[in-house]
Amino acid sequence: MEKTSKNCEIFKNFYYHLFERINFEFTEETGEKIKPYKDYEPNLLLIFCDQYQDEEVILDQLTKLLSGLIILQALPNANHRTAFRFVDLYFGFVCEGKMKTYKEAKNLYDEFYDKSKPNIDFEINHGALFDKKYMDAHHKMGINNHQKYSKELLEKIIETQSGMIEAVPFHRFITSLYQEGSSSNQTGSP
């Protein structure tokens, strides 16, 4: 359990660093900062990490990570962008895969966002995300729809050298983030 806790701290810090990097890039590009619309909730990232169960197939793993991180809404803003950046880094670690960037597939990302945002806002209760007692049919349907939208998008924007390969466990990826001594070179633009 101690290793999982250490991994989850690494994940929480790394994920927030990605958000800060995205905020920095946004400021460089526009001259403005991303405006927070809510408080940062680091405990949600820790719970997500601690409870995450791996998928065997890479597309299923990518879908579960992407959808789960977006639904979590743990960051003050840029939850979609940060989730995509994280999934892209994971995908690059697992194989010679590449995700199309927003500029390369703007219409696909915009279409996804148009479905994702209302689904999160109106169908999924964030406060009950980890409450097993609450998982009623409406809540579960909202999560399933979001995963469906996420998978549809990923099928269109990911490319691999060798097809759909086996997924690397999430916690193994997290452990790898700091094995090199620094993660700063891993948080650049996808």
Image: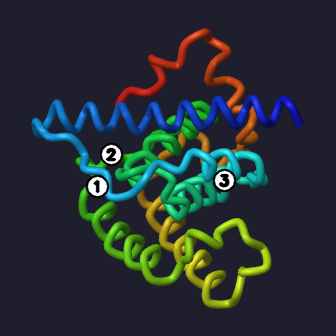
Residue type pointed to by label 3: Gln
> For mark 2, does the 10 Å Cα neighbourhood hold few (<14), some (14 to 19), or many (20 or more) residues?
some
Residue type pointed to by label 1: Ala
Distance between the Cα atoms at labels 2 and 3?
19 Å
Q: Is residue 145 left or right of residue 175?
A: left
> Mark 2 = which residue?
101
Question: Residue 140: image x %, image y %?
Answer: 66, 81
**Which of the 4 quarters of the picture holds residue 109?**
bottom left
Residue beneath the point at 86% across and 31% down: 2
Relative vertical location of residue 128 with respect to residue 108 in this rendering, above or below: below
Residue beneath the point at 71% across and 26% down: 175
Question: Residue 39: image x %, image y %?
Answer: 43, 53
Residue type pointed to by label 2: Thr
Residue 56 in view of the camera: no
Farthest residue toward the bottom?
Answer: 137
**Which of the 4 quarters of the picture holds residue 182?**
top right
Q: Are marks 1 and 2 in contact (CB under 8 Å)?
A: yes
Residue beneath the point at 25% across and 46% down: 34
- Residue 105 — which label? 1
